[in-house]
Image (cartoon, rainbow, N blue to C red):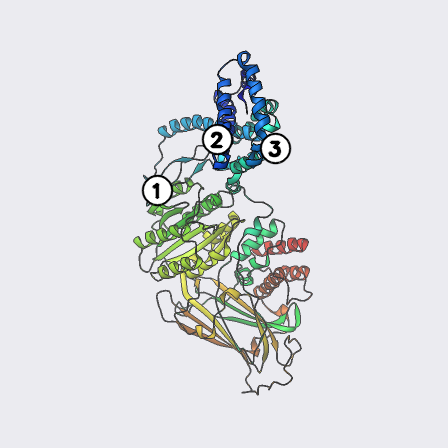
Amino acid sequence: MKKTDLKDSDIQNALNSDQIPAYEKTAKQQAIEAALQQFDEQTEKKFQGSSLIQRPILITANIFKKIGDWIMNISYSQMATISGLAIAVLVVALMPQMQEQIPAIKEQQYSVKSSSQLRQKTEEIAAEEEVAVLQKRADIQSAKKPQPQAAAVQRKMLPPVASYQYAPTPESMANLSAMPQADYDVAAGGGGVGVQHEVNAPTIARMPTKMARIAKLEAKSYNRSRLLGAQQMAEIAQPLNRVADHIEHDQFAENRDRFAKPQENPVRLTNKHPVSTFSVDVDTASYSFVRRQINAGRLPQPKAVRIEEMINYFSYDYPTPTVANRPFKPTIALYPTPWNNKTQLLHIGIKGYSHTPISKKSNLVFLIDVSGSMSSQDKLPLLKNGLKMLVDSLKPDDTVAIVVYAGAAGTVLEPTSVKQRAKIIAALDRLQAGGSTAGGAGIDLAYSLAQSGFVKGDVNRIILATDGDFNVGITDKDALKGMIEQKRKSGIFLSVLGFGQGNYNDRLMQELAQNGNGIAAYIDNLNEARKVLVQEATANLFPIAKDVKIQVEFNPEQISEYRLIGYETRALKREDFKNDKVDAGDIGSGHTVTAIYEVSLVGGTGQLISPLRYGSTTKPRSKSEELAYLKIRYKLPNETKSKLISRAIVKDDQVDDLNQLSSDIRFGSAVAAFGQLLGGGRYTGDFSYQDIIKLANSSKGDDQFGYRAEFVSLLRLADSLK
């Protein structure tokens, strides 16, 4: 490309086209020169990459470049004839060989995007200079009102528009106006928060319009044969995925969320498999995620549906135990299945002993993901608001510490008394998202900090808040599980709060919470944050029992088949029930847990498994009236040996009419039906969303917070989306 194609008068006219800041004029000038210089550098690079066989071409090209440089230093009148003749001869003689030996300069590989490239360079330079001006202003204001920062904090600016490596298009500029204007960075072993120097959205929005003026000039001055090649443009635009980290959602985002769900529980023959064993589950993440998907106008992927978490999302008014050493009192009911009049539902509900120990302190460590994927409004900003509500609900002598992780992990706030609320809130307010996700390093640091403030008998807990996108550090799920399993033995539990969608790693977060003796919750809005962190804080922070397991032995004389609805990820082996080394779920103060079996009675017509033609029948062992036998095994929080609660399930627990049951039991069956329909409805027959709506509406009961009414609304939305 010859610089003579762009006249000085044209450049000056473009710079004086209207009244704009001086630094943008400079940006235009530098952008034009940068575009020309880049073409020269790219061309020279291609020639330098030639092989020895292409040596004559390389020498000739260098001569051609020197002649071009010489031409630029003399007047047009002196060299017009000479340069024109020389260039014509060289082009005619060498172009066929150049096109054959250097594919990157072939005509068909050239792109027509020089206006985008020039506008991109102009935007970059203008943005850098404008940020510098605004940063000076912010520094002056910061000097007047100094803010405390950790010594290891490195201030690092993220430009208001994407820099050169982002290669944005004009259409993406509007999206980039919502990007965070600061980045978090931390030195090894230190921690802190980046300082925000904000460039307002109107400033960003007007840049593309001004850049268009210079694009008109360059379009007039350059022709297609002089544009950058497609390969060069591809190299410039390669890191486009970094821009995608700051886009809240796109139409394919839900397909990148990661879930793990084993095969749905099958129907079991009682005479072959009389015993069912599983770990309790008080997690609620699945229901919140399902709700978000439906409210967004789409049904959730079946793998995201865990029926037990949907049922246990709601509280039930089961009888509350009165003795802490025997923290559970089972509630049993056997009643006709709403979706199959040939089978029965066995409803098992337990509610944990409820207490709020005033003498116990809460020593909490907030482990917060501040990576780039957490920048959207439904992630880090929502998380900060939720944690502020939690801080307000804590006692004055409780302590809070904050550890963050992105490209590295660091301590933002040492253990601080809740009495110093302003200090804690200020530390939360300063958090900004940016960088990769070294989750493993963050977890390790959080446990170290929790151990330093550990008080035996108190609540020592880490609350991990993330979208689960661990991509730096310890990323192997088994390695993370192993580390957390070792740490929980010290008495420090781990709970996990999930946020956002698009790269939501539910599979990993479930594993971490289960192995950390904590809960896994998904927070999709501020009301859910209040429910998890304030309303249910006592249940989530104060465990009354750990390693809680349920085992049901069915009597083959009374029950021919059974199927456990949900709990696929919590299944245990029969021998695991009495093995105190096998980990299981924990229950907090006042937590409720519900399990539902669908069973076929002996002599009924609801069996799905046909009897064997040649198999021997099992002779009755007794004339027992027991339908099944329930056993619950648990450990008290500070003990290592399990205890047992057992109860026979008899015909007196059976009712013939669903309406004779409490609203809690009927509502639980409605949620179970909904979860099965979302998962494919393999066993629900013709039972429809309208049938579930009718059942749920009639069993909302005392809906103090409106959660059951919200459930009915979700049913109506799902019915319209099916």
Question: Which badge, 1 or 3, is on the more N-terminal residue?
Answer: 3
Which quarter of the image is occupied by the N terminus? Answer: top right
Pick out the residue farthest to the right. Answer: 686
> In the rendered structure, which amino acid carries the disc numbered 1?
Ala
> In the rendered structure, which amino acid carries the disc numbered 2?
Val
Q: Residues within 10 Å of mark 2 (few under 14, many from 20)?
A: some
**Residue 274 location (% of width, % of height):** 53, 78
**Residue behind mark 2:** 199
Of circles 3 and 2, the one toward us is 3
Viewer-nearest residue: 21 or 693: 21
Question: Which badge, 3 or 2, is on the more N-terminal residue?
Answer: 3
**Residue behind mark 3:** 107
Cα distance in 3D space between marks 1 and 3: 49 Å
**Residue behind mark 1:** 187
Of circles 2 and 1, the one toward us is 1
Viewer-nearest residue: 523 or 136: 136
**Residue 686 location (% of width, % of height):** 69, 65
Q: Residues within 10 Å of mark 3 (few under 14, many from 20)?
A: some
Question: Can you see residue 240?
Answer: yes
Q: Secondary structure at mark 1?
A: loop
> In the rendered structure, which amino acid carries the disc numbered 3?
Glu
Cα distance in 3D space between marks 3 and 2: 41 Å
Classify residue 699 by image quadrant. Answer: bottom right
